Image (cartoon, rainbow, N blue to C red):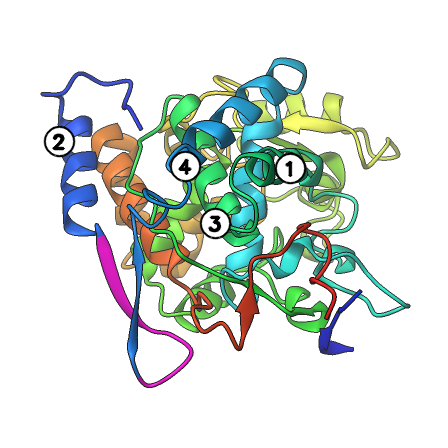
Amino acid sequence: LTHQPLRNMASSSSPSSPIALATLAVLLAAVCLLHAGGGAAAEELCVDYYDDTCPGAYKIVQRVLVQAQRSDPRIFASLMRLHFHDCFVQGCDASLLLDTFDGMETEKDATPNKGSARGYNVVDAAKAALEAACPGVVSCADILAIAAEISVELSGGPGWGVLLGRLDGFTSNFQEAGNLPGPFDGLPLLKQKFVNLGLDNTDLVALSGAHTFGRVQCQFVTDRLYNFSGTNRPDPTLNPAYRAFLSQRCPRNGVGSSLNDFDPTTPDRFDKNYFTNLEVNRGFLQSDQELKSDPGAAGTTAPIVDRFAGSQDAFFKAFAQSMIKMGNLGPIRNPSQGEVRNRCAFVNPD
């Protein structure tokens, strides 16, 4: 059941700040990024792709997100995660948004997404608002990219020029979604999953920094607290005080779906505290702490963690660049291979 068709910016920093200058540099360097798309000819994703056809697209999505965040403080982190999980499976094609149809399982139902991926209703609301303003113009894949940037920037993080012009795919890959980077992955496996997509160690560390905001379920830390690697003991890399705190939040026989802050210091703010937490062994997920504590990290990812922990500007600049790079994973530009969906959960009828 793989690849089945399913037919039926303004920065908060001052203009002269290092963050603002870094963001401007990313924008100017990547107004239009060439890639091999859908055929022999080079196609373009451009920041100004909708300037003529739907000039208010960004502000329309922003209004929907601001409204949603008023009743759901988690939504910005959730939308960031949707974009990540979409792009890592057959490219940034909105395949994650497709509903299961006639028993054919989609990425939504894969283990990394089912019961934890959220925000689909907000994407649908943004799509409806865009359809009212510019029918048949803005793809769901581009909505995910725009929503991720807005979510980060409104949470205090960097802005960047979002490259646009993707089409929505016709397929969803349930099996491939099962191989998304996971909370229990060791560093070698994490690095390999990123390398397989043309992403390097800096991308791995920078994009992992998105765990500086949002919530995570107890089930993803239980083994670290009580039975790490089958030892019936806690993870020795876990800070003892933090372990005691988490043990109260996530008792051995507690509810696995109970939520915890990724970053207990500034849970809803996008900042460098994710990395300062790793420096003192306070990473929530095993896959987070591996970036600093794995024996193989010393010459690879740990120095990057150290650099970002010491400089929020360095983290913000690298994160913006890695988001542009990730957003260019396998975008569909050939109309024979994609479309602008009328509704994000369904491929358009013939």
Above or below 49: residue 200: below
The nearer-to-camera label among 4 and 3 is 3
Earlier in the chain: of badge 3 and badge 2, it is: 2
Above or below 19: residue 160: below
Mark 3 = which residue? 142
Q: Secondary structure at mark 3?
A: helix
Please tell me the numbered disc located at residue 21.
2
Left-right relation of 315 to 5: left
The nearer-to-camera label among 3 and 2 is 3
Earlier in the chain: of badge 1 and badge 3, it is: 1
Mark 1 = which residue? 128
Earlier in the chain: of badge 1 and badge 2, it is: 2
Residue 146 in percent (x, y) is at: 44, 40
Residue 276 in view here: yes
Q: Amino acid at mark 2?
A: Leu
Which span of residues is magenta-colored?
A: 32-40
How many angstroms separate mark 4 from mark 3 (CA)? Answer: 11 Å
Q: Secondary structure at mark 1?
A: helix
Earlier in the chain: of badge 2 and badge 4, it is: 2
Give the residue displayed 65% in from the left and 21% down from the top: 245
Earlier in the chain: of badge 4 and badge 1, it is: 1
Mark 4 = which residue? 149
Picture quadrant of residue 25: top left
Magenta stretch: residue 20 in it? no
